[in-house]
Image: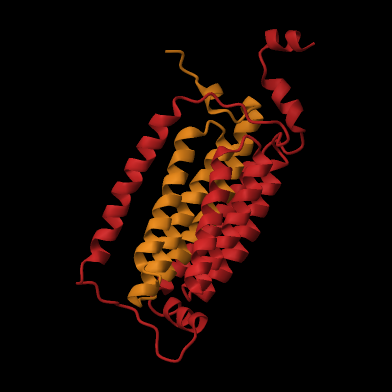
Amino acid sequence: MTLTLTHYLVLSAILFAIGIAGVIRRKNLLMLFFATEIMLNAANIAFAAISAYIGDLSGQLFALFIIAIAASEVAVGLGLLILIYKKYGTLDLDKFTVMKG
Amino acid sequence: METIAFYIFAILITGLFLVTILSKNILYAMSALAAGMVLISGLFFILGADFLGAVQLVVYSGAVMALYAFGMMFFDATRNVKEKNSSAAVVFLLSGLSAVVLVIIFAAPSIGENIKPLVTAAANVDNPHAIGEVLFTKYLIPFEVAAVMLLVAMIAGIILASKKMDKSLSEVYIDTLPEEELKEQK
C-alpha cells in the first residue's frame, strides 16, 4: 500500500477540524491562539503534500510564507494578550463582556 | 517504510493536538503543541520538502514556542483554566461539517486532471537549492514583503508589550480595580 495525496489531505482535514473545535470550544485567549496554530499547520501540510505530489515548488514556498505570517501573528498577538492581561487581570473571554445586554 | 512512518506520525500528531485543545493546563497544552510541531516537520521530510521541514523545526518549535513560553511568564500558567462550555456535541458537529466543506473546496481542483505544475524543480538539484532558486527569482517580492512584515510585527510586539513595563503586573491590575473590589480584597 503506497501513500497517496489523499492520505495527506485527510490528515490535514482532521487536524483542521481539531483546530476549529479548539477555537469554538476554548474560552481562554492563550488556548485560542494554540488552536489557530494547529489550523495553520494543517494548511501547511496540505500545501506541502500537494506541492510534492504535483511536482510544483510553489506550494512549499506558500507554506514558508504562512510560517512567516504565523510568526509575526504570534509576536503581535502576544503583545495584545499582555495588554489585555494588564487591563483585566484575566484571559477569560467571558470576563470581557462590556455591554450588559 | 514511508507508509509506516506516515501512520505513526499522523496518529501521534492527532493525539498531541487533541491534548492541546482538551487539556485544562496551559503548560500541558503548550508542550503537546510543541511536540506536534516537531512531528509535523517529520511529515515534511517524508514528502521530500527538506527545507520546509527545517524551517518548521527552527521557526515553529523553536521561535514560536519559545515566544509562547516567554509570554506565559506574564500569565498565571500553573493554575488550571476554568472554562464554561456549551454542549460539546454541537461544537464537534459544527467543526466536522466545516472541515468536510473545506476538504471538498481544497480537493476539488487537485482531483481534476487539468492541473499542471508551473514552477518545477530542475533535475538533479536537491530541495533547498531548488527552493532558493525559485524564492529569489519568482517569489522575490513576496519574500521582501514578508521581511518588512516581520519587522513591523517585531516593532509592534515591542511597543505593545513594553507599555507600563516599569510596574509589576499585579500593581497595574490593582490600580484599575473599582474601589469596592479593593475593599473586598483587603
Q: Residue furthest front?
A: A1
Q: Is residue A21 placed above or below B171 in the rendered structure?
A: below
Q: Is residue B87 placed above or below B122 in the rendered structure?
A: above
- In this rendering, does residue B158 appear at all? no
Q: Is residue B167 left or right of residue B176?
A: right
Q: In this structure image, what is the colour of chain B? A: red
Query: Residue A32: horizontal and vertical position, in percent?
Result: 52, 39
Q: Is residue A6 left or right of residue B182?
A: left
Which residue is rendered at x = 71% and y = 38% of the image?
B74
Q: Is residue B1 placed above or below B145 in the rendered structure?
A: below
- The number of numbered discs placed on residues in the rendered structure image is 0
Query: Residue B93: horizontal and vertical position, in percent?
Result: 36, 36
Query: Residue B90: horizontal and vertical position, in percent?
Result: 38, 30
Query: Residue A83: horizontal and vertical position, in percent?
Result: 62, 35
Which residue is rendered at x = 61% and y = 43% of the image?
A79
Q: Which chain is orange?
A: A
